[in-house]
């Protein structure tokens, strides 16, 4: 069975790059009819941020990326926190020591610094002189019994089974062992594993078949493959994903830029739009050939979707092709997110159940955030909010726009603003008062409250006054632009519309009614 893992560190809120990586794991696993694990890599206690795990879980739940095994779900690969797997890492370290693929190093930090500097002065590429590799078994045993602090290093002077590496994104990769430090550390003095050892042991013992991770880990791949070889087990297939960067080209991180998933949740972006946006960023390259050990391997990659193609999660799963990811970093275009969000919002509100869901989320935001302060209960009924959503239609990019684009549909118009005064500045006060008063009476007397009847009512009223439309729009909204007047009347209803006509006529900007 195909099995993948998403393995974040609990060092802060989940950011967009992390959500994208979880998404790719989800898409790959679901397309292959496989499963994926959430594994928390928390061996570096100094960097842990309280609440991070819960935040990661909440973000994944919001996105609908339901992992098959992991914290809160369980499964056959538990435990899913690395801090609870320390005995396992020590066991595998003992195996490496026994086979001679690892050794204990008792050098102090000062000694290691001196050795490294000395090697650098001689022009050597080595970072350690392996002096502890040559200690006798008796000497090692004596120093261990004496309680001397030490680390455990991988013995890279041994023979490893190395073969050409075919990355699922980049194809053939050149051997980069020359860039590794000399005999990398596997286990630290505190008994905690380095990322490299824990990563390999966990992927092996959990039965991970495919590893999708950021491109920055390509430089560590030779080390990980050496550890697999030293343990005598097969490595998984790797796919290194080019990272997301900020618009200025700098690496996107939790400390730089607007990247927290929680912020996108709070701002009301549609989850399907965010996933659509992240998935298509960097998805679209066609690679026709790869060079592996001076030979050319042909491969065919299907055409990837356009970067603004509107796709739901099922469509993303169906079309996802990891080999079609670009080989370069990608930046996220907020304009594309806005476009995609509008389309997903429209699609979501196109069915009765979807419309009810959008209306429910709008009401929740009104209740929790109070963007307009306290509002009357009559403006929060689901049926009313659904009417507002329909009338705003393509004007709304985000569910917040349903409120902020037309606040007058949730609170009474403010006729005292400069913009409101400017709307009717050229209309005589007496005429304004008369027009809105009479039209309000027309609305109270209209027999059927529908588009046809309202259009007929407006047509008749226009014959009485050429300033009807600006005066009525002012009375209904106190805002110059907005949906057609008939649509506004349909949403507000007979009573609210007539009440606003009267309120506008009685406003201090009008002559008092006689």
Image (cartoon, rainbow, N blue to C red):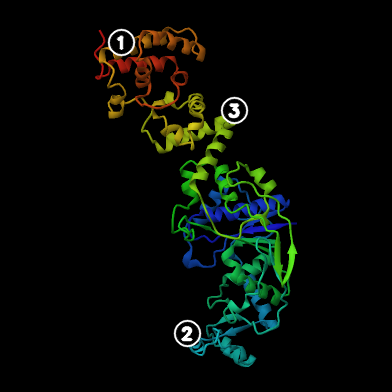
Alpha carbon distance from label 1 to label 3: 41 Å
Q: Quadrant of residue 472?
A: top left
Q: Residue 435: where, in percent of width, then height?
A: 33, 12
The residue that mark 2 highlights is: 113
Residue 5 located left or right of residue 501: right
Secondary structure type for disc 1: helix
**Label 3 neighbour load within 10 Å: few <14, some 14-19, many 20+:** few
Residue 86 appears in view: no
Q: Residue 266: where, in percent of width, then height?
A: 46, 44
User: In the picture shown, does residue 364 fall above or below 66?
Assistant: above
**Label 2 neighbour load within 10 Å: few <14, some 14-19, many 20+:** few
User: In the picture shown, does residue 171 fall above or below 412?
Assistant: below
Label whose residue precedes the other's in the sequence (3 or 2): 2
Secondary structure type for disc 2: helix
Label whose residue precedes the other's in the sequence (1 or 3): 3
Q: Which quadrant of the figure contains the C terminus?
A: top left
Residue 484 located left or right of residue 157: left
Q: Residue at x 40, y 17 (%)?
A: 497
Q: Which quadrant of the figure contains the N terminus?
A: bottom right
The residue that mark 1 highlights is: 434
In-front residue for pair 160/177: 177
In-front residue for pair 335/102: 335
Q: Quadrant of residue 469?
A: top left
Q: Are marks 1 and 3 in contact (CB under 8 Å)?
A: no
Q: Residue 511: where, in percent of width, then height?
A: 24, 14
């Amino acid at each position: 069975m195909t099995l993948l893992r998403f393995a974040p560190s609990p060092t802060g809120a989940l950011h967009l790059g992390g959500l994208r990586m979880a998404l790719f794991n989800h898409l790959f696993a679901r397309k292959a009819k496989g499963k994926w694990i959430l594994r928390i890599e928390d061996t570096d206690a100094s960097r842990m941020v309280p609440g991070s795990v819960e935040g990661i879980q909440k973000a994944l739940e919001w996105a609908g990326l339901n992992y098959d095994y992991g914290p809160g779900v369980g499964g056959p690969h538990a435990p899913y926190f690395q801090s609870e797997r320390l005995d396992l890492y020590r066991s595998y370290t003992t195996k490496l020591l026994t086979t001679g693929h690892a050794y204990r190093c008792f050098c102090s930090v000062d000694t290691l610094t001196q050795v490294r500097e000395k090697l650098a002065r001689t022009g050597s590429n080595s970072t350690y002189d392996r002096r502890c590799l040559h200690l006798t078994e008796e000497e090692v045993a004596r120093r261990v019994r004496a309680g001397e602090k030490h680390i455990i290093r991988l013995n890279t002077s041994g023979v490893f089974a190395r073969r050409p590496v075919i990355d699922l994104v980049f194809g053939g990769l050149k051997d980069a062992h020359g860039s590794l430090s000399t005999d990398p550390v596997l286990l630290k003095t505190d008994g905690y594993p380095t990322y490299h050892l824990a990563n390999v042991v966990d992927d092996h013992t959990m039965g991970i078949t495919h590893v999708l991770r950021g491109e920055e880990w390509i430089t560590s791949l030779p080390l990980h493959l050496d550890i697999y070889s030293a343990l005598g087990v097969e490595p998984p297939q790797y796919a290194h994903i080019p990272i997301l960067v900020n618009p200025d080209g700098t690496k996107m991180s939790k400390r730089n830029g607007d990247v927290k998933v929680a912020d996108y949740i709070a701002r009301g972006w549609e989850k399907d739009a965010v996933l659509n946006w992240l998935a298509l960023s960097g998805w679209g390259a066609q690679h026709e050939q790869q060079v592996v050990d001076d030979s050319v391997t042909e491969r065919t990659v299907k055409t990837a979707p356009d970067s603004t193609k509107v796709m739901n999660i099922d469509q993303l799963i169906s079309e996802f092709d990891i080999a079609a990811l670009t080989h370069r970093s990608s930046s996220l275009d907020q304009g594309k997110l806005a476009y995609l969000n509008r389309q997903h919002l429209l699609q979501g509100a196109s069915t009765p159940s979807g419309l009810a869901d959008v209306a429910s989320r709008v009401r929740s935001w009104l209740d929790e955030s109070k963007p307009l302060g306290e509002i009357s209960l009559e403006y929060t009924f689901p049926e009313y909010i659904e009417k507002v959503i329909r009338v705003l239609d393509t004007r709304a990019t985000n569910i917040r726009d349903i409120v902020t684009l037309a606040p007058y549909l949730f609170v009474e118009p403010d006729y005292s603003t400069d913009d409101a005064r400017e709307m009717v500045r050229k209309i005589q006060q007496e005429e304004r008062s008369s027009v809105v008063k009479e039209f309000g009476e027309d609305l109270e007397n209209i027999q059927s409250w529908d588009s046809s009847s309202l259009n007929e009512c407006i047509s008749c009223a226009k014959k009485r006054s050429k300033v009807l439309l600006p005066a009525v729009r002012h009375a209904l909204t106190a805002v110059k632009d907005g949906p057609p007047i008939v649509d506004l009347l349909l949403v507000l209803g007979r009573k609210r519309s007539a009440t606003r006509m009267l309120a506008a006529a009685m406003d201090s900007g009008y002559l008092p009614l006689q």
